[in-house]
Amino acid sequence: MLGPVILAASRSDKMRRFVSAAPGTKQVVDRFIAGESVDQVVPIVVDAADKGLEVTLDVVGEDITTPAQAEAARDAYLELVERLKVLDLGPRAEMSVKLSMFGQALENGHELALANVRPVVEAAAAIGTTVTLDAEDHTTLDSMFAIHEELRKDFPQTGCVIQSYLFRTEDDARRLAAAGSRVRIVKGAYKEPASVAYQDKAEIDKAYVRITRILMEGEGYPMIGSHDPRLIAIAQELGRQSGRKLDEYEFQMLYGIRSDEHIRLAAEGHRMRVYTAYGTDWYGYFMRRLAEKPANLLFFGRSILTKG
């Protein structure tokens, strides 16, 4: 399977240099990354709002090695909040953050990440929006969930992400599916060992359905992160079975993937949110998008062969 190989490459400096220099890279990166700066991403938020879509914005970058870099990540999000405030876009755009970007892996990383992310969550709340904590590899999750719980004491709308390929996730979903919670369910895009995660796609999909049912039957707000037509249809049916109105859950898809489906779901009355990443440190995010879907890798390969 190519997925694990690509995920391993996402941590390779040698592969980073190769991919960055490849002639077709920019064409493919531009498909998944909305731009490098706030100035480039704001028009995309405006366009999405005009189409009846919402967005969640991710400033890409995970391999933080110093506290100063973590503070710079915090400041990048604060700059984003300020731009959304000026343009009155807060109600249409939330933010997604990876705690590794806020220093989670550094010395005293749990406390550092909490200290850096709190002002972002506070600033988001002040303009009428919120923050979702993205899930990363399984070794980081206890810290992420603890930070999520701490933030929700003052900002109960703070969301988090769970991943269906991990064995632990059904228990996490039951705990999180409480009144006022916001939980995004995704399949998972990190290389995880067989001791903690399903390795077979069919088993991951089955777990996804079980977890979606738990969220739909719970009292929180489910966010269905998937591009899979079958899983989307199942989620719609589970929503109906649970008596949920269309605005009592939402779908989320990545910027640049199945854009027509974004419009279709919104036209049906669903809340549809587009996960929109931007920034200069795009490599890790980009490689996981390739790993998730072989068609993305084929598209990249064709771009290299044709020199973009």
Image (tube, helix red, strand yellow):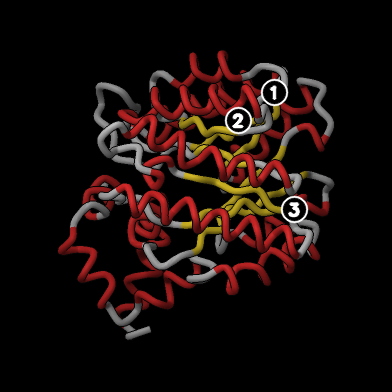
Percent x, y of residue 116: 46, 42
In front here: 87 or 279?
87
Which residue type carries mark 1?
Answer: Gly
**Furthest-bottom residue in view?**
307
The CA span between labels 2 and 1 is 7 Å
Which residue type carries mark 3?
Answer: Arg
Mark toward the start of the polypeptide (2 vs 1) = 2
Which residue type carries mark 2?
Answer: Val
Which residue is identified by label 3? 92
Which residue is identified by label 1? 220
Q: Residue at x 75, y 53 (%)?
A: 92
Mark 3, secondary structure of its residue: helix
Percent x, y of residue 167: 39, 20
Instruction: Confirm or deny contact between disc 3 and disc 1 (CB under 8 A).
Output: no
- Along the horizontal axis of the image, is 260 left or right of 166? right
Mark toward the start of the polypeptide (3 vs 1) = 3
Displayed quadrant of residue 209: top right
Q: Residue at x 84, y 46 (%)?
A: 269
Mark 2, secondary structure of its residue: strand
Instruction: Confirm or deny contact between disc 2 and disc 1 (CB under 8 A).
Output: yes
